[in-house]
Image: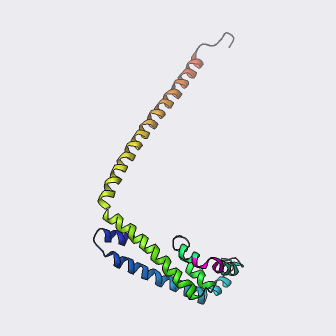
Amino acid sequence: VFGAYLAGRGFLDPVLVFTSTAAGNFATNLFLYYVGIRRGRKFIRKHKRLFHEDLLPRVALFYRKWGVAAIVFGRFLVGLRSIVPLFAGVSRLRPRKFILPMVCGILIQHALMVYLGYTVGQKWEFIKSVLRDINLGLALVALAVAVLIFLWFRRVRKSRLERVMRKNSRNDSPGKLGD
């Protein structure tokens, strides 16, 4: 997104930003898929404290049921983005059922990120002026709240002081006969 922002500001080429980030993401996902196929099951079986014993059958069932959709939509879930290709490999999802949905997900995700970053970069001066106005408004609201809190504390303190003074004046007054 930052590279796309820089492209919007005229410092980088948006096509280069898109292709380089998408290609890097594609290579990383293929690597994770490969690691899942080659070492994933052994790792899961070896580290039973980290993984529940029925993880492998559950992952395989999940990918049989939701494979393509899980791979495409997993691109948009920050916490799951990295484990989707890994568990696709662990579940032995066939490469032809993995690669095309992964490429589609990457292209959609990176197109959106580059578009958004590029648009922000192009409209940066406008965004800065809007943010400046918003910050000014928020500062005025914060100042008003601070003044109200100050006045409220002052009133509460004055009220407490008056109660203490009344209590002390009652204690200082002459008592009844026989006291």
Main secondary structure found in the magenta portion: helix
Most extreme residue toward the right is 53
Magenta stretch in the rendered image: 62-68
User: Is 17 or 135 nearer to us in this picture?
Assistant: 17
Image location of residue 17, percent across then percent down: 36, 77
Quadrant of the frame with the C terminus = top right
Depth check, front residue: 105 or 36: 105
Protein image colouring: rainbow
Answer above or below: position of 35 versus 127: below
At a point 63% along the width and 79% down the height, the residue shown is 63
* Left or right: 133, with 92 as reference point: left
Residue 79: x and y in percent read 55, 70
> Which residue corresponds to the image point at 31% horizontal and 54% vertical from the top-left?
129
User: In which image quadrant can residue 67 be found?
Assistant: bottom right
127 relative to 53, above or below:
above
Left or right? Give the position of 27 relative to 53.
left
Q: Residue at x 37, y 70 (%)?
A: 2
Picture coordinates of residue 41, whole percent (x, y): 64, 86
In the rendered image, the vertical position of residue 88 relative to residue 153, given as above or below: below
Frontmost residue, 142 versus 49 = 142
